[in-house]
Amino acid sequence: MNGYFFTASATRHLPNLGPSRTGCQSLIVCADSAEAAQKQFEAWLCAQPEGEIPMTTRINRVVAAQFVDKLLTEKEPVPIDWPQVARQAQSDLESIPADNFEQGYWVDVNALVAASPDLEALRADLPEDIRSGLNWAEDKQSFFLLSVLTPPPPLPDPGDEPEADAADAGQPVEETAGGSAFGLDESEAEFPELAAKEAAVLIRARNAAVAAWLWRKYAADSQLAGHQIRIDPWFGLAGLEAKADPDATIADCTKAIELNPDDANAYIRRGGAKYAKGDFDGTIADCSKAIELKPDYLDAYMGRGAAKYSKGDLDGAIEDYNSAVELKPDEAAAYSGRSDTKYAKGDFDGAIADATKAIELKPDDAGGYYIRGIAVLAKGDLEGATADFTKAIELKADYAAAYHSRGVTKSVKGDAEGAMVDYGKALELDPKYAWAYHARGCLRYDSQAFTDALVDFRKVIELDSSLQDYAHFRTWLTRTRLGEEEAAIAELQTYLAGRTTGKPDDWASHIGRFLAGQLAEPEFLAAAQDADPETEAQQLCQAYFYTGSKFLFAGDKAKAADYFQKSIATDRWGYAEYRSAEAQLKLLTAQET
């Protein structure tokens, strides 16, 4: 694991809190590669305090340098143990009273620190007013971050003029690596820490002058010896395991509310932490209070809309997203949230329109393409869905859900091999992605890879309670195909007896009872009928597949084929049962020929 020192300028828009603001932030990141480290840094930079809906963040510039692999100390250089460094740095910070950070810790090291034979000589060489303000106690050590700066480009001759006035000619001025036509970077003038860096060095010493002296001594024979340096205090470290604590956030915000009952931000943060714990009613209550205190609080409408969506109150969620859009018509996240909700309501055209607007406002947001992709897929546009999922993956290479959904699209198109690749990638990125296990298990079942399919369905049962019903139904199918019929029935009956998902007499319970031998075929098919034509078509698609499977297991291939054809005739191609009926019918047809 390597260490990388990142600094970036970023412009943030805080909803309802005034104009955009540009600032500069730094972070140490531990990762296996520079690319992985930068992804972590940018994710950290775009995040906000726990429990709040993300603000709009634009990253303007990032500079980075890899750490020299030695920790420089006053005794000797030693290998860097990042977990140990993190613990020691935290201990150092906790030992210093908040109001007792001494002055004089930082000096102009480039001007004042020269080559000296030892520490005593270094101390004697410093001016008295500087020397007396620094810590010289050997037992009081701190971590310093030293940046080895890239030399600036040479300044142009004052007499040189550009050959042509590009602005007058209607052409853009060609910029150099420095950021302007003359190699001068305005961002460095405002934020000197954004200067380009050759390397980063971690040093533990008694003061900044000693830290600089140690580097000069260590690098004396290297090409970096003469470079300008910059010394900063310890920055936070990412890349080591750390988990957010919503309970602590709730406690902190509750205390803040006690001290200031009109603090709308505290209600929003607490509502966000409650959302993370699955307390959607609590989130709604806190967001509603924030709106009462601040009627134009965009984040409160967004947070309440998300909580209502999670509770199944789709109409209420759309009302809140409508309010968010009215408050800020150029907020892409409001359109994305409303698009997702419209999709859940079956309003696919509305979902596509809102997702397209979100993409228009924020073209680099992978989520907008993903949401539009699932709505486009629901309308049967397989090529359009594939294009949107692929674009989402291009923008966010670790987007497991996009890989899974593209895999489903490929499966519907008959590209089983491509679907398997995408399901595998989704699971590589997220080993707990139950939907991808289920989709891959169904595809393996359809291709007669029953042993592998059973492994996937077992994994679904382990990971996701919301998929328990259909994972158990598929487990019954797979074990029966493996010749374990009695054990399969016993397992399914045990599950049904203790079933906690759904309602006792819902459609899934009818499927389970039919497969377990507790419901006859006529009653099962009658239960699939529904006053709503769409619901009936969906349930019949499943009923015909499971009925056909039972006939197939009993050796009646003719009746099995008839029921598989009926399942396909419902045209509910988005259902795994439809695709499985299609696959089984092809196998039966091939066997006959």
Image: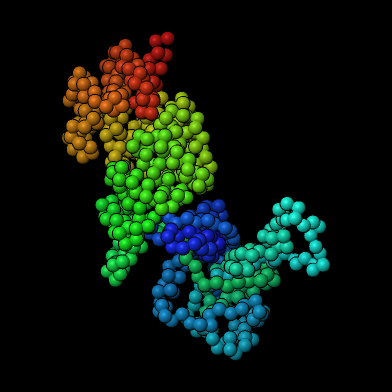
* Position in image of residue 467 (x %, y %): 30, 37
What residue is at 35 percent from the left and 55 percent from the top?
300
Residue furthest to the bottom: 128
Closer to the camera in the image, 31 or 64? 64
Say whether residue 248 is left or right of residue 492. Answer: right
Closer to the camera in the image, 180 or 389? 180
Visible residue check, residue 190? yes
Q: Which quadrant of the view contains residue 439?
A: top left
Closer to the camera in the image, 301 or 542? 301
* Position in image of residue 420 (x %, y %): 45, 32
* Position in image of residue 590 (x %, y %): 42, 14
Say whether residue 73 is left or right of residue 499. Answer: right
Q: Which quadrant of the view contains residue 131?
A: bottom right
Quadrant where the C terminus sits is top left
What residue is at 43 percent from the left and 58 percent from the top?
15
What residue is at 33 percent from the left and 37 percent from the top?
345
What residue is at 41 percent from the left and 77 percent from the top?
98
Instruction: Establish if 102 lies above or below 418.
Output: below
* Position in image of residue 77 (x %, y %): 56, 70
Say whether residue 66 is left or right of residue 514. Answer: right
Visible residue check, residue 448? no
